[in-house]
Amino acid sequence: MKLAPGFTPFALLFSLMLVIPSLQAQNAEATPALDGHQPASDENATDDEMDGPEARLPLEDLRKFTEVFERIKRTYVEEVSDQELLELAIEGMLSGLDPHSAYLKPEAFSQLEESTSGEFGGLGIEVGMEDGFVQVIAPIDGTPAAKAGIQPGDLIIKLDDDTVKGMSLEQAIKKMRGKPGSKITLTLARDGETSPIVVELERAIIKVTSVRSEMLERGYGYIRVSNFQQNTGKDFIEALDELKERNNGDLSGLILDLRNNPGGILQAGVAVADALLDEGKIVYTEGRVSDSQLEFNASPGDSAKGVPIVVLINAGSASASEIVAGALQDHGRAVVLGTDSFGKGSVQTVMPLGPDYAIKLTTARYFTPDGRSIQAKGIRPDIKVQQARLEAVDSDRPMTEANLTGHLGSGMEPSSAEEDSGEFTGTERLDRDYQLRSALNLLQGMSIFDRRRQSNAQQPELN
């Protein structure tokens, strides 16, 4: 096999020596990223920020690269183009850094935009890489994956008959997406299971509504945020206002459910936290260049008016959902209940390379208001409650006065306006969700305690 006409490894070496310093000085046009902030370019970076011991590659390393390039071109079993080899080199550089940095070809770039807009075709799973396999971070509510019982932490080891080991994340996602109505078989490995789990799923158009709400019991609202999209902050405030209106203007307590929320757009997470905080820091980021060192602060006004809040998290709560939980926890604005979160505390920046290609690069770590790093640690709940299936226990009801025929009334029967009107839709959910039931019980206890404390404070002192 011969190299392309006019191409030699020494020509490549010379071109790399010219290009690399140019790339180091070039400003990267950056756009908002999934789980990322609005990054600026490197134009404000100082020479000290950009230069360092490794800023310029030694000539020997460049020679090594061109030698590998030449040997692949000359002796690989199949012919491979220069462009393909260079793209593989770029992919390798990024994928070798961390599980979230990636080279985005046109299809992957388009998929990233789809995932933040809230509509795409596929199974409805947020995934990452773990030990060469595709790991489920969280299934998206109401999707084929969620309905099939796929769980956070599951490892996808086969897609149809293809072994996932060795696939890139982009390749796996491409295979999982497809025409609505078409089917795919996933083979999963799950902790605690001795044999693989095989699930057949039918692809569908995934329209993700990131915010939904309901009244669990009188006075107690529930808001579920399944991921953070462009409009999640606005939708959250609207859902909260609707709950308050249904309860005559005020709530006794609020449950914010961030379980199995894989994250999304950083600014959307900041907006949700801002809605529940009156002041103070929400999150800050730290990276190598000045433009990656950002701080987000709450604006005046608590949309929940200071009512007690319980935030639910689990191992599927990642990234922006951890920002929200961490901010509310650090400010003492909410009690966090559930299990340890996923621990994704990094920010990815999407840097376009022309109209169709981009790189998604981890550019910063983020920290909670108290300076806690979430990366690989996660948010630890204030009250740890494992999920469990609730099962009603049938037993003979004890005889009480109210069971006796012709019993006297208490004289304090509720008026028709006070009776339950069937408007509470969370009964079935509470009956099967132990963590949610625990959160509601906690809220009710906090509410009772607050009322008694306020009542005692208003009573005159006796001398």
Image (spheres, rainbow, N blue to C red):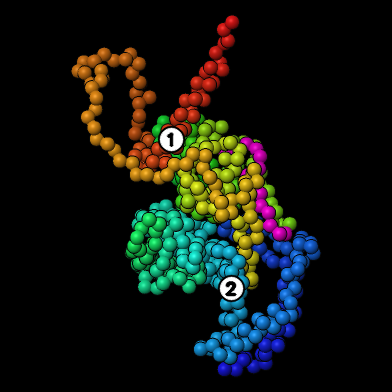
Instruction: Please identify the residue farthest to the right as the structure is shown.
Output: 47
Name the spot of residue 392 as percent of width and height, x first. 29, 38
Q: Amino acid at mark 1?
A: Leu
Q: Amino acid at mark 2?
A: Gly
Eyeballing the image, is 90 above or below 244?
Answer: below
| Residue holding disc 2 | 92
Going from N to C along the chain, the mark reached first, 2 or 1, is 2
Label of residue 310 in the image: none
10 Å crowding of disc 2: few (<14), some (14-19), many (20+): few
Q: Is residue 173 visible to us here?
A: no
- Residue at x 37% of width, y 65% of height: 187
Name the spot of residue 49 as percent of width and height, x first. 76, 62
Q: Tell whether 101 sits left or right of 20.
A: left
Q: Tell whether 24 sits left or right of 203.
A: right
Q: Is residue 282 magenta?
A: yes
* The N terminus lies in quadrant: bottom right
Q: Is residue 234 magenta?
A: no
In whole angstroms, how far apart are the C-alphas of marks 2 and 1? Answer: 48 Å
10 Å crowding of disc 1: few (<14), some (14-19), many (20+): many
- Residue at x 58% of width, y 91% of height: 74
Identify the magenta region: 275-289
| Residue holding disc 1 | 440
Foreground of the two, 114 or 140: 140
Q: Is residue 85 visible to us here?
A: yes
Eyeballing the image, is 64 above or below 118?
Answer: below
